[in-house]
C-alpha cells in the first residue's frame, strides 16, 4: 500500500529520481514490479517500508518448453 505523500512525491517531481527511473524502465518487461520498490527504498520514505514480500508471480513457461525441445 502506498501513501498519498509518496504518490505526490512521485507525481509532482520534487526530486528528479522518480521521473528518471520511469524513463529508464519504460522499455523493460515487468518494469512496474521494480518501479515503486526502487523509488521507495532510495528516497526519504525508506523508513516506512515493511520488509515483508508477499508478492505472488505466476509465469507461463510453456512457450519456453516448446522452443527447448524442438
Image: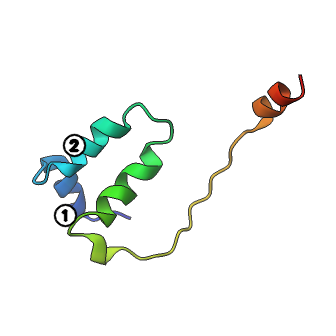
- Residue 4 as seen in the image, left or right of residue 24: left
Q: Tell me where residue 5 appears, x and y as whole percent.
A: 19, 63
Looking at the picture, does residue 13 appear above or below residue 69?
Answer: below
In the rendered image, the residue lying farthest to the right is: 69
Looking at the picture, does residue 66 appear above or below residue 51?
Answer: above
Q: Quadrant of residue 49?
A: bottom left
At horizontal 56% and vertical 67% (from top left) the residue drawn is 54
At horizontal 43% and vertical 45% (from top left) the residue drawn is 32
- Residue 62 as seen in the image, left or right of residue 27: right
Total marks drawn? Answer: 2
The local crowd at label 2, few if under 14, some if 14 to 19, many if 20 or more residues have their Cα within 10 Å, is: some
Q: Tell which circle, 2 or 1, labels the residue nearer the N-terminal end.
A: 1
Looking at the picture, does residue 17 appear above or below residue 70?
Answer: below
Using the image, tell me which numbered label, if any, was put on residue 5. 1
The local crowd at label 1, few if under 14, some if 14 to 19, many if 20 or more residues have their Cα within 10 Å, is: few
Using the image, tell me which numbered label, if any, was put on residue 35. none
- Comparing 11 with 35, the one in front is 35
Q: Quadrant of residue 9?
A: bottom left
- The residue that label 2 is drawn on is 19
In the rendered image, the residue lying farthest to the top is: 70
Amino acid at each position: 500500500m502506498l501513501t498519498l505523500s509518496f504518490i505526490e512525491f512521485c507525481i509532482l517531481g520534487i526530486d528528479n529520481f522518480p521521473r528518471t527511473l520511469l524513463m529508464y524502465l519504460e522499455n523493460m518487461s515487468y518494469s512496474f514490479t521494480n518501479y515503486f520498490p526502487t523509488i521507495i527504498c532510495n528516497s526519504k520514505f525508506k523508513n516506512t517500508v515493511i520488509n515483508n514480500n508477499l508478492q505472488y508471480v505466476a509465469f507461463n513457461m510453456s512457450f519456453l518448453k516448446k522452443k527447448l525441445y524442438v
